[in-house]
Amino acid sequence: MIIPNNKYKIFFIFIIYLCLSISFEMRVNASEKQIVKTEEIEKSAMDYLLKTLPWDKKSLDINVYYQGKDITLPPGKKELIYKIMGSSQRAGRIPMYLEIRINDQFQKRIRFNTKVLVSQKVIKTIRAVRRGEILSKDEIRAETIKTERPSKNAITNMDYALGYEASRSLSIGQILVPNFIKRPALGNRGDKILITAQKGGMIITTAGILKEDGYKDAMVRVLNIESKKIIYGRLVDSNTVKVNF
């Protein structure tokens, strides 16, 4: 009866030892691994885009569409290397990939999509505008939009649009850029003006005709009616061109 009991004791001790060994090995293996959470992947991607994209960080609305799960990695120094995939796209749908390295050794590459919207202040038409119309608050207004296609050239200040002339016909809701508008001419080709010239205390005046549209303080070609010669002068106001002797 003693021998069987000893056998059971030995078997029982062996089972306990085996369980403890497996448990210890599992703990060791668990401590050797590291996990990259989906939240870390998405947040790091957002941080990369915020640092890389040319827009004001406060204006960006970024969504990262990573469909995978947490990633288990071996121990070591972890590097998450993000890249925008072969595109100059800087807003809208931006495909990316993540390369994971441990101790500078490649482990995994993951592809995913992101979507970036940019908040941008713009000046928009609120009705159709014909070419040559002078813009007022009845034609345009400032508005902040979220867009996938922000314009670096968009006019953002009403002061640079009010009082300007439409250089082309504009549809309703059109975002203004510099080549859509121009400063209205102070004088137009064919307008009769007064040519003035001053030397010392003497002022000479004569009649002239503008040969081109002109802007305030800009040089213009003007016909001297009396001499029939084309001369150049500075457009002082809508009625006067000043020339130098």
Image (tube, grey):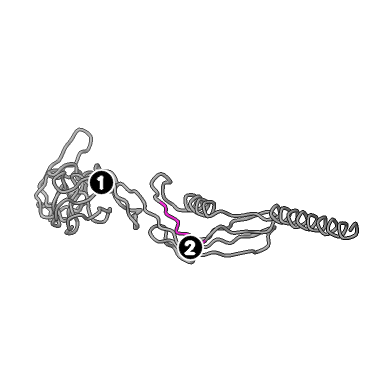
Going from N to C along the chain, the mark reached first, 1 or 2, is 2
Residue 63 locus on image (x, y percent): 42, 54
The quadrant of the image that shows the N terminus is bottom right
- In magenta segment, residue 63: yes
- Judging by the rendered image, the residue that carries numbered circle 1 is 143
Residue 115 locus on image (x, y percent): 40, 57
Q: Residues within 10 Å of mark 2 (few under 14, many from 20)?
A: some
Tag 1: amino acid: Glu
Tell me, yes or no, if residue 245 can be seen here: no
Q: Residues within 10 Å of mark 1 (few under 14, many from 20)?
A: few
Nearest the eye: 33 or 131: 33
Tell me if residue 108 comes above or below residue 176 in the rendering: below
Q: Which secondary structure lies at badge 2?
A: strand
The quadrant of the image that shows the C terminus is top left
Q: On the image, which quarter does residue 7 sit in?
A: bottom right
User: Left or right of 215: which side holds 120?
Assistant: right
Read off the magenta span: 62-68
Whole-Å distance between the Cαs marked 1 and 2?
33 Å
- In magenta segment, residue 170: no
Tag 2: amino acid: Phe
Farthest residue, direction right: 3
Q: Which secondary structure lies at badge 1?
A: strand
Q: On the image, which quarter does residue 169 sit in?
A: bottom left
Query: Is label 1 in contact with label 2 (beta carbons under 8 Å)?
Result: no
Farthest residue, direction bottom: 86
Q: Could you say which disc has been placed on residue 198 in the image?
A: none
* Residue at x 52%, y 63% (from the top left corner): 97
Nearest the eye: 171 or 227: 171
Nearest the eye: 220 or 159: 159
Residue 160 locus on image (x, y percent): 25, 45
* Residue at x 11%, y 52% (from the top left corner): 209
- Judging by the rendered image, the residue that carries numbered circle 2 is 112
